[in-house]
Image: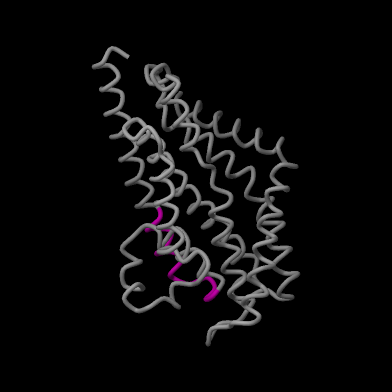
Amino acid sequence: MRLSLYSTLFLLGFRTELRLFVATMIRSTFLLLLLFIFSRLWALILPDGLSMPQLLWYFLITELIMISTPRVYLRMERDISDGTFAVLIQKPINYATTRIAESLGVLLGRLPSFVTLGATGTLFFTSEVPAGLRSPFALIIAFLLIYLAASVLTISYAIIGLCSAFLRDTRTLSMVWDKGVWLLGGLMVPIILYPPWLQQIAPWTPFYYLLFGVAQIALNGVTVVCIHTAIALCLWGAFGMVLVGLLQRKIASDIIGEGG
């Protein structure tokens, strides 16, 4: 029964995002601007051993994960501040799971548009696709990994949203988290170009798998690393859901203890 309800919320988020197709395409223009800037940059400064198409397609994948992930913590912060959370927490369904399900539907609704426009722009700027992404199988694997990584990132944003019950304002926490993703995930530059000491630290964090673990398919194609990345993302996602449950239980007990 509950699974059916969460599926309905997922579809609701998906359909709602489809109705906002024009707004999604407008947001996609920012991605095209970034791709143009980095295409000019990599044309002037090209690291040894990597081609400009590899680097730009790598950047496309990392940006797709970041730009397509709904900032669910903003809605959760509003729910907690205006008392909506106190009402919904007493319902027979799980509050955080409903928000995550809705966000995953939104993610699925907007990702194809971002992928289509971003891939078209990247192909225009580079005139070629890296060897590792030329097969339909590789493209499917890349899309699935992007969606999986964005889903795990959504769960992390849900954790930030729940933390607003203690912090009241999550802007600082979300900013620190995003900076960690950008730096240790290799948003703009592949981690293989980082200093050796930073390359050793990054794999111990979830950021490494959220971006670099997925985007390196543009550098090396479909390899066993893709399986390792998928497993790591699933484990981090499971850990995140456990943390979501613990935080929600703590907040609920505080609300009940204080009489709402």
Q: Is residue 46 above or below residue 181?
A: below
Q: Residue at x 26, y 22 (%)?
A: 254
Residue plotted at (35% across, 45% down): 240
Q: Which residues are magenta?
A: 219-233
Determine the main secondary structure of the stretch shown in magenta. Answer: helix
Name the residue furthest top: 259
The answer to which quarter of the image holds residue 160 is: top left
**Percent position (x, y) of residue 1?**
46, 23
Across and down, in percent, residue 74 comes to: 49, 36
Q: For residue 47, which quarter of the picture?
A: bottom right
Residue 229: image location, x then y, percent: 42, 62
- Image quadrant holding the C terminus, namely top left
- Quadrant of the rendered structure where residue 257 is? top left
- Which residue is the extreme one toward the bottom? 48
* Total tally of numbered discs in the picture: 0
Q: Is residue 232 magenta?
A: yes
Report the coloring of the rendering: one colour
Q: Give 77 or 205, whichever is nearer the viewer.
A: 77
- Where is residue 195 drawn, in percent x and y? 38, 78
Above or below, 129 relative to 62:
below
Residue at screen point 67% across, 55% down: 30
Left or right? Give the position of 94 relative to 125: left
Residue 199, above or below 114: below
Find out whether residue 178 is within the magenta segment: no
